[in-house]
Amino acid sequence: HGPMQKMYWAADPLQDFGFSIDQCSEHLKSNINIRFGIILREDIKELFLDASLLTGGVPFLNYSYPICEEDLPKFSFCGRRKGEQIYYAGPATNLGFEIPKGEHQILLKLYNENHSMVACANATIICS
Amino acid sequence: IMWPTRLAGMLLPAMAFLSCLRPESWDPCVQVVPNVTYQCMELNLYKIPDNLPTSIKNLDLSFNPLRHLGSHSFSNFSELQVLDLSRCEIQKIEDDAYQGLKHLSILILTGNPIQSLAPGAFSGLPSLQTLVAVETNLASLEDFPIRHLKTLKELNVAHNLIDSFKLPDYFSNLPNLEHLDLSNNKIRNIYHEDLQVLHQMPSFKLSLDLSLNPLDFIQPGAFEKIKLHELTLRSNFDSAEVMKTCIQGLAGLKINRLILGEFKNERTIVNFNKSALEGLCNLTIEEFRIAHFDEFPGDDLGFLNCLPEASTISLMGLYLDELKIFPKGFKWQYLNLSKCIFEHFPTLELTFLKQFVFTANKGITTFTKVNLPNLEFLDLSKNGLSYKSCCSHRDFGTTQLKHLNLSFNNIISLDFQHSTLKQASDFSVFLSLKNLLYLDISYTNTKIVFLRIFDGLISLQVLKMAGNSFQDALLPNIFRDLTQLTELDLSQCQLERVSQEAFGSLLRLQVLNMSHNHLLSLDMLPFKNLSLRVLDCSFNRIVAANGQELQHFPSNVTSLNLNQNNFACVCEHMRFLQWVQDHRHILVGAEHMMCEKPLAMQGVPVLSFRNATCQMSKTIISVSVLSVLVVSVAAVLVYKFYFHLMLLAGCKKYGKGESTYDAFVIYSSHDEDWVRNELVKNLEEGVPPFQLCLHYRDFIPGVAIAANIIQEGFHKSRKVIVVVSRHFIQSRWCLFEYEIAQTWQFLSSHAGIIFIVLQKVERSLLRQQVELYRLLSRNTYLEWEDSVLGRHIFWRRLRKALLDGKPWSPEGTEDAESSQDEATTST
């Protein structure tokens, strides 16, 4: 609904992974609400996000962010155990830039302190 | 015929051995460490695989639909230490399921929807230390059949349905229990009797996590006289009032570490107010940590006044706009303020503080002085702070500082002189200081080994590093990134050599101090292309500079100091010494530059060295070389043309006088018969008689052949008869005589050479004597023909030639002619 569409699928066929963004407008607000669910295959004492934004296969933005740090983590899902189900519904910090018009691919990778992949996803954003 | 069978005999056991080793034998599990660790995660196993070695210690069976664990399920694996059964859809665990696992230390049951747990489900686990039963539908600790697990240290029952905080009585059987994770359960109320067991076990050092429980009420006095190691309460309260009553309910607790806070994605208190934390005054807290309160009342940190005796305070992820009223004089030793938002840098006056971590904060841009006299550890990284200057002891009010982290800030000036920097040359320590303009690491006992030590200092303008040292006393190119540098102090660094590329990137360098080093020569190549204005190389051991490199000396230099060096005032360094004279206008104290060598010149001003002395010796050398050359050339010439000269001398002596002989005959001894029988006979006995000079007859014995040839042969003869034959050309003496004859002909104009070709000489042979060949083809010569007519003509022509220039006696001539004719006729 609206000028922006997002499609996603898990890059890892074994992952039980769900993701959705509630708000769909051309200019992302500073805090967008997302919903995210996963059954963990790894402990996540620490969790890191690597995101790349590509247009026509050419990356134009790479973004790395520590989501969970060991000492007093920000989010309640930090420190969860392998086999545990987590569900997150809430705000996600906006990356702080406008998405230019066109079709873009987003590559998301979540990995833990041992560099084991926790989740990964490809998404396509069509911004018109 | 034998060897194939032998080969087969060897191969068969080998193959049998290899087949035992093939990896599929553990199928479908993955062997991580042979016989120890096996990974069977998510393999759709309905039962525990039986083909694993019995020695296995770590087994991961997670994500398999095992559904039900019967008794003695793992009896094959008595050595197991770690068993992971995460999300195995286990609903039922029967009695003695783990029986026999004497060594099992960690049991993980996360994510199993357990509905039936037999009372003896965990029996026979005498070594179990960690039991993880996260998300297992557990509703009560009371019914959890673990009372016999005396070795248990950590019990994790987070993310369950537990609604009571009643710590079961059997905890008194678990004297080693240290960690109890009850987070993310349904606990609402905590009553006095829930903690009864803790009263009975005063030696307990329990760490308790109650985060994410929807706490409503803690009965006052419930924690009275209770000791805990750690209590975590994050995202527990729906409102400030609830929080206030619950904190008050903790009154009387003695605790090592209390952690309060929220999670960004969980329930938050909307209207936080300062009263919420008032109750802290009733607790005894060693370490207090507070994290991520979204709506924290930044104007009131009054609660900190409840913690004067605490040793550690940590405030993380808070919005604190007023920190001016930060408490003073407390006994805090460790203070951590990170990920907060500040309006002002906190004014700190804490006498006991040893460690101050102030990182990743936002909102402030300038650092203000603090007074922390016992501070040893300071982390100010990731703040984006601007420092005009750092780091004097006045900035921090301490002289005890041992560790300083200033990464990711906006520091303009850093001054570490006379500190001791450890590990400064192990990695690019200044990498993130891209705005730094001034860096002083003088006298910090730093030995520069790592070449990229100054990487990242892209804005640096002044670098002072006097009094340090370099590996191998060589200055390498360590200034790669310092393209903006204008001033560099490298004095007292024990430098002996400077690499040619050392200053290659410092195109803006204006002032360079290399004094008080051990440089042996003034190398100009490193300074090539620099826009240097001031160069100080005084107090080194410079002997001279390479004369070839002097042209690379930067032209902008207005001040050059070369005093107190070991100059060698010798002609070898003439170009350098001349250069010094030419540049005396830019040399600082040029008149005080003294020679050190040679001994005779010691203490003499360099400027008084006169190049003229070198010039003079140069002339002498060149003249003597030239004369030697001339003499040797002359000697060579004389040697080569000795006989020609003799001839010349003789010409003058005998030139005017009468000739003794009419002709000197040059011939090969092989042709002697012809000369005796024909030539001598015909010419000497004919009319008029000619006097021939023949070596066998006329040469004076006792005189050298060459001398005879010249003195007797040439000088005393009017003409020379050359008897050309094959032998003549092959004879060295003949050719020598012929060569002299040519010179002789050249010297005395009247002389003539008469050629007689005795026998037809092969042209090829003749060509070897180019001169002779040319002469014969240009001049008329006589050819000996052994026929009557030929002889007649021959002798007539020869006589005629010999008569030329002979003093005239007509009668004799005619007689001779007639008698000759007669003789010829008679023969």
Image (spheres, coloured by chain):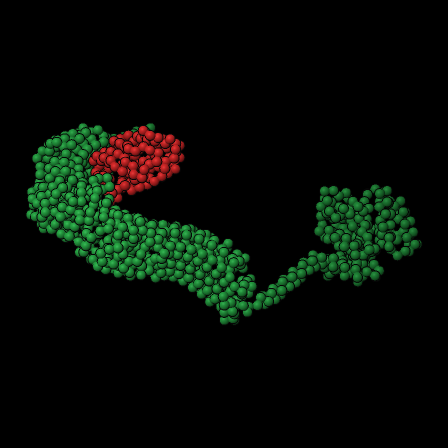
Chain colours: A red, B green
- Where does the image place residue B315, in percent across and percent down from the top left? 23, 49
Q: Nearer the viewer, residue B722 or B509?
A: B509
Residue at 49 percent of width and 56 percent of height: B531
Q: Nearer the viewer, residue B511 or B799?
A: B511
- Where does the image place residue B795, in percent across and percent down from the top left? 85, 47
Relative horizontal placement of residue B805, taking residue B177 as reference (left or right): right
Q: Residue furthest right?
A: B811
So how many labels did they put on this image? 0
Relative horizontal placement of residue B79, taking residue B792 as reference (left or right): left
Relative horizontal placement of residue A113, taking residue B675 as reference (left or right): left
* B155, above or below B323, in the image: above
Q: Is residue B31 visible?
A: no
Q: Which quadrant is home to the C terminus of chain B?
A: top right
Residue at 90 percent of width and 56 percent of height: B808
Q: Nearer the viewer, residue B102 or B636?
A: B102
Q: Which quadrant is home to the N terminus of chain B?
A: top left
Residue at 20 percent of width and 42 percent of height: B269
- Where does the image place residue B157, in percent across and percent down from the top left? 15, 39
Q: Is residue B644 visible?
A: yes
Determine the image quadrant of residue B499. bottom left
* B53, above or below B473, in the image: above
Relative horizontal placement of residue B628, taking residue B24 as reference (left or right): right
Residue at 28 percent of width and 52 percent of height: B358
- Where does the image place residue B781, in percent across and percent down from the top left? 81, 46
